Amino acid sequence: MIKSKKYLAAKANELVAAFAKQAPANPNLEEAIKRAQAELEARQIAPQNIVEQLVLDSYRICRLSHLKVNNEAFRLLKEMEALSRARSILPFFRYDPWT
């Protein structure tokens, strides 16, 4: 299902903020989260790309630092993975001025 760009941006902001609260305490992970939040606020890159990079960085940092992730943070990472694969447009679609 195709989502609107506004929905994807709002959902990305919501998930990153929730993950920032649930993530394990690690300076590298906190830096990655802050970078993702700054990029989302700048609105220069698609939210899917920002979230995808945050998920990859989170997995990499947790694996290299041997961090444990609680169930809620893992659920948020899985939601962010699904959001990173969501698409907002098709090559040919009807113009909708309300999205």
Image: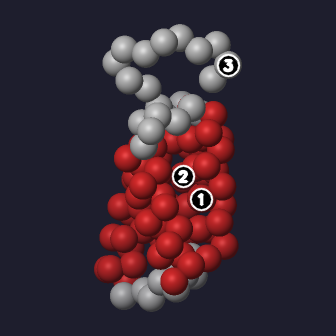
Q: What type is the residue that disc 3 sits on?
A: Trp
The disc, 2 or 1, on the residue closer to the chain's N-terminal end is 1
Q: Residue at x 53, y 11 (%)?
A: 95
Disc 1 target residue: 16
How crowded is the residue under tag 3: few (<14 C-alpha within 10 Å), some, or many (20+)?
few
Marks 1/3: CA–CA distance: 26 Å
The N terminus, quarter of image? top left
> Of discs 2 and 3, which sits in the foreground?
3
The C terminus, quarter of image? top right
Tell me residue 60's x, y (percent): 33, 70
Q: Secondary structure at mark 2?
A: helix
The disc, 1 or 3, on the residue closer to the chain's N-terminal end is 1
Q: Residue at x 65, y 66 (%)?
A: 18
How crowded is the residue under tag 1: few (<14 C-alpha within 10 Å), some, or many (20+)?
many
Mark 2 and mark 3 in contact? Answer it, CB < 8 Å: no
Disc 2 target residue: 36
Marks 2/1: CA–CA distance: 8 Å
